[in-house]
Image (cartoon, rainbow, N blue to C red):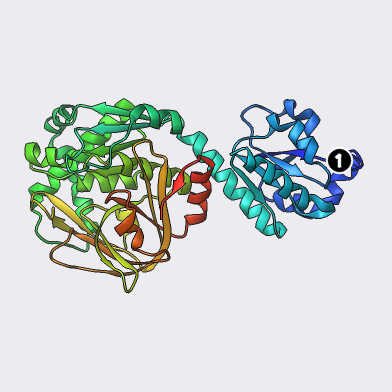
Amino acid sequence: MNLYLIVFTSEAYKEEKMYECHKDLFLELEKSFTLHLIYFKDASKIPGNAYKIAFIANGDVENIVIQNFSILPYPITLLTDGLYNSLPSALEIAAWIRAKNLQVNIIHGAVTDMAEQVLCHHRAFATKRALKGKRIGVIGIPSPYLIASHVDYLLAGQRWGINYIDIPIEEVYKRFYQITNDEIGVEASLFATNAKACQEASPDDLLKAMRLHKAVKSLCEQEHLDAITLSDSSFIRQLKVSGCVTASLLNNEGIPTSSEGDLQAIITSLMAYTLTGQPSFMGNPSFIDKNQNEIILTHCSIPTKMTEDYIIRSHFETKIGIGIQGLMHEGEVTLFKCGGECLDEYYVTEGYLTENTNYLTYCRTQVKIKLNKPVSYFFHNPLGHHHILLQGKHEKTIKEFMQQNRCKLIE
């Protein structure tokens, strides 16, 4: 990975001693990057699409930065190790930038911390670039009860560079009816064999679920889709099969997939996957305990890669087709949601998954999570009901990414 530092120095600073003066920081950065030191006068030589940060090398450079403000990469980040009065200069520059109502961030601290912050910053930069041109398939019509989960396709495309592609659900029906049971028998048998148990679902339910998975996957390949959201209710009415297995397996295979046609949930899943490389679980907050600051998140589909074991069940609400009861490991998790019609708001918190519950009145997969942030968000400022769960701690990475893209944190 290449890192171009746009170096700002005063006239009294000896450029030939630059590397030696800041050697500790540069050596730490070189563990992760190929480092290029480019003095601000030569900034035009940096490739246009390169990853670059402004480096404040010493004090008394405030006017130099202001005079060359146009070369600063936006959103503006100032890197300073504090040597030679560089931190005071960075603080003054940041105050000037904020006075112009522009976003600015200072990376400073111990050299290991700075290197980690730069890596986080770069991951956000790379993710934004990776999202550009991604195609999200909207198969069927979003569920009518998702009254707050709409997305303005045009504004979403302008902000994130992604494209929502409306696909008639009949395209899936056509493929579904063309697939024979012989074509998916092995996959169905393997899915059943790997399950801890099979309860309400029948062999015919399993074969239908695998036929739907194959049908939707072939459509993804033909339309070059990077993520999809499915209209489950249409499948249940027309085909007598839920999309739970389809969503689970496609998420396993690196195609972020959400159900119910939730346009906000699927972009959240795609962001999470692009940032972390991990599949995610889309869940409903089904019970919230204010006193314990805990939430029970539920749904009938989960990527089996996220589970320790899974049980083949029926779809909870309709009792038709297959739902998946996933049993997850106890451990650190992150809850994330990108929302708003223009996808310019977000919520994120880390927490600890403490238990897999098994209440009769909720969807099949149920996980209890103790959140690090107050659960009052869900009562006062919720961004809809579907939220995305990731295994591990990713709040810092997600916040860096969303802040770079000028999104508002909702708490």
Seen in the image, is 63 located left or right of residue 356?
A: right
Residue furthest front as drawn? 99
Estimate how packed mark 1 is, as few (under 14), some (14 to 19) or many (20 or more) residues with alpha carbons within 10 Å. some
Q: Along the line of sight, which residue is nearer the eye, 409 or 98?
A: 98
Q: Hey, which quadrant is residue 179 in on the image? A: top left
**Nearer to me, 389 or 67:** 67
Q: Residue at x 71, y 60 (%)?
A: 110
Which quadrant would the N terminus be assigned to in this image? top right
Q: Quadrant of the C terminus?
A: bottom left
Residue 84 to residue 330: above or below: above
Q: Position of residue 84 (x, y in %)?
A: 84, 52
The residue positioned farthest toward the bottom in the image shown: 291
Say if 60 sits above or below 160 in the image.
Answer: below
* Residue 60 visible within the image: yes
What residue is at 45 percent from the left and 43 percent from the top? 274
Residue 183 figure quarter? top left
Query: Which residue is found at the position 66% from the left and 49% from the top?
Result: 106
Residue 124 drawn at (x, y percent):
53, 43
**Of the residues shown, which amino acid type is indicated by label 1?**
Ser
Image location of residue 299, percent across then percent down: 22, 55
Residue positioned 28% across, 41% down in the render: 149
Q: Is residue 399 left or right of residue 21?
A: left
Q: How many marks?
A: 1
Q: Is 132 left or right of 232, judged from the image as shown?
A: right
Tag 1, which secondary structure?
loop
Confirm whether residue 37 shows in the render: no
Residue ID for mark 1: 10
